[in-house]
Image: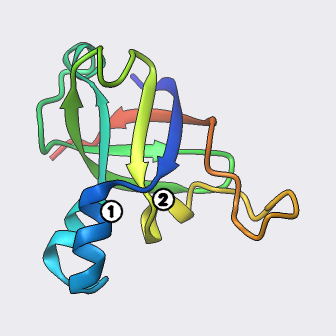
């Protein structure tokens, strides 16, 4: 059953270093197509590291792999995804005059993707 959570898009150090190699290289693709989520949320949804999940926002939908984080690193109900082509599909086009789509506090539904 899908659950509603809050997604935050942002930059990560791993994303930055993999970007130097190129956006079409395996490491960048992997880091920008993985959503980090609280390990307790993952357990409740029956997920383990590497499992595919579907994220849906008012602007779009993507399937990504999930990676667990401890509660001290990522509170329950909060998700993090590195900026990239997939995260952009979940953001609205409104930039609030900044030139960068609003990427914080995006309400998404999360559901496991069955094999």
Side (left or right) of 41 relative to 100: left
**Tags 2 and 1 touching, CB below 8 Å:** yes
Q: Residue at x 21, y 85 (%)?
A: 21
Nearest to the observer: residue 26 or residue 61? 26
Q: Residue at x 29, y 15 (%)?
A: 72
Q: Residue at x 22, y 73 (%)?
A: 18
In the image, residue 98 sits, relative to residue 42, either above or below, namely below
Residue under pointer 2? 87
Q: Which mark is residue 76?
A: none
Side (left or right) of 32 relative to 42: right
Mark 2 lies on a secondary structure that is helix
Q: Which mark is residue 32?
A: 1
Residue 73, position in %: x, y? 30, 24
Mark 2 / mark 1, whichever is N-terminal: 1
Mark 1 lies on a secondary structure that is helix
Neighbour class for label 1 at 10 Å: few (<14), some, many (≥20)? many
In the image, residue 9 sits, relative to residue 80, either above or below, namely below
Asked where in the image residue 22 lies, by quadrant, the reply is bottom left
Asked where in the image residue 75 lies, by quadrant, the reply is top left
Residue 19, position in %: x, y? 30, 77
């Amino acid at each position: 059953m899908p659950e509603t959570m809050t997604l935050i898009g942002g930059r990560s150090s791993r994303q930055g270093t993999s970007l130097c190699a190129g956006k079409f290289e395996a490491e960048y693709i992997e880091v920008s197509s993985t959503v980090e989520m609280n390990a307790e949320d993952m357990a409740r949804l029956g997920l383990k590291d590497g499992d595919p999940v579907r994220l849906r926002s008012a602007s779009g939908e993507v399937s990504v792999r999930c990676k667990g984080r401890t509660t001290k690193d990522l509170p329950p109900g909060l998700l993090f995804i590195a900026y990239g082509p997939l995260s952009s599909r979940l953001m609205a086009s409104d930039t609030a005059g900044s030139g960068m789509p609003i990427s914080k506090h995006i309400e998404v539904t999360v559901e496991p993707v069955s094999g």
